[in-house]
Image: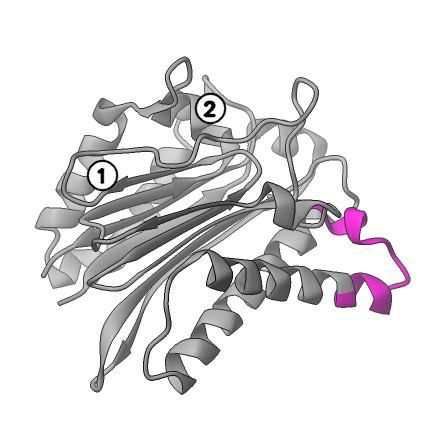
């Protein structure tokens, strides 16, 4: 029993034009232990373009999230995927970024980034989000968007995990079932993946990805990330967005 996963980020054409590196970071993996059920983790962070170290902040967020989950999975017999755990999780992410900023004599907002996370067992799913981007899941009822993507007070603004009120704006959704399908993405492809007027999943966008994940052989799995990167860098995508793009996917293969 496990999930098949793939995730990657691609630099946006606007960043390429200015010689700026990709400021998105992501991770998708399945923690395994013979004595425990598998645990799916998917994290996506998007560094703020206005923050001088936003890309580094995104990397630190992914590192902290991975360490937090890994520690709980290794040390705990079981743990509840609920609001309280989500708050502890985000506090750990914030602590790592704030510590890095202090060490460099910088401000935490210099490392501003959004953060989206999915942690799931075969029995439950926890979604966490601060900022824009989106999470799409299917826990048996078709593709859903349990958390409405966030916008800031003004146009083209959003919330960041480094904000003082990050815990207050943290959106959490706990679902009492395993996810059959998961997609997590940064705002670079948000308008391709969602029907923005209704904040619902644009199913035709996701169907090819989940079809590939469902039918991929073991030999093909190694090529999935390269194929996903090729899609994110394709003219068809770049014609519709010039921002950095991240897409992380999981499919339950039993």
Residue shown at 34%/63% (left/top)? 29
Q: In the image, residue 243 lies at what x, y percent?
A: 56, 29
Q: Is residue 51 above or below residue 222?
A: above
Residue shown at 30%/68% (left/top)? 39
Check disc 1 and report its element: helix, strand or loop: helix
Residue 101 among magenta residues: yes
Residue shown at 71%/50% (left/top)? 162
**Which segment is the magenta one?**
99-113
How many numbered marks have been drawn onto this rendered protein structure? 2
Q: In the image, residue 175 lies at what x, y percent?
A: 29, 49
Q: Nearer the viewer, mark 2 or mark 1?
A: 1
Quick one: which residue is furthest to the top in this view? 197
Q: Which mark is residue 16?
A: none
Quarter of the rendering containing residue 18: top right
The quarter in which the N terminus is drawn is bottom left
Calculate the distance from the C-alpha at mark 2 to the C-alpha at mark 1: 18 Å
Residue shown at 13%/63% (left/top)? 218
Task: Indicate the colouring scheme.
Answer: one colour
Residue 107 among magenta residues: yes
Task: Report the side of 230 relative to 167 (left or right).
Answer: left
Q: Which mark is residue 238?
A: 2
Which numbered disc, 2 or 1, marks the residue that appears first in the sequence? 1
Q: Which residue is mark 1?
A: 209
């Amino acid at each position: 029993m496990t999930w098949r996963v793939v995730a990657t980020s691609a630099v946006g054409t606007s960043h390429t034009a200015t010689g700026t590196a990709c400021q998105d970071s992501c991770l998708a993996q399945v923690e395994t232990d013979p004595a425990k059920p598998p645990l799916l983790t998917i994290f996506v962070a998007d560094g703020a373009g206005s923050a001088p170290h936003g890309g580094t902040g995104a990397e630190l967020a992914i590192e902290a999230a991975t360490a937090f989950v890994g520690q709980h999975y290794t040390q705990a017999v079981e743990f509840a995927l609920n609001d309280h755990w989500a708050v502890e999780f985000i506090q750990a992410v914030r602590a790592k970024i704030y510590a890095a900023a202090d060490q460099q004599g910088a401000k935490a907002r210099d490392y501003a980034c959004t953060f989206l996370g999915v942690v799931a067992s075969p029995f439950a799913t926890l979604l966490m989000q601060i900022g824009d981007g989106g999470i799409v899941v299917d826990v048996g009822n078709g593709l859903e968007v349990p958390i409405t993507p966030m916008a800031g007070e003004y146009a083209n603004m959003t919330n960041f995990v480094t904000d003082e009120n990050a815990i207050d704006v943290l959106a959490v959704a706990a679902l009492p079932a395993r996810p059959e399908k998961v997609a997590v993405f940064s705002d670079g492809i948000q308008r391709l993946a969602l029907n923005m007027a209704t904040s619902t999943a644009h199913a035709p966008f996701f169907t090819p990805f989940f079809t590939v994940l469902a039918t991929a052989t073991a030999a093909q799995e190694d090529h999935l990330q390269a194929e996903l990167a090729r899609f994110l860098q394709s003219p068809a995508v770049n014609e519709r967005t010039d921002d950095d793009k991240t897409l992380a996917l999981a499919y339950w293969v039993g």
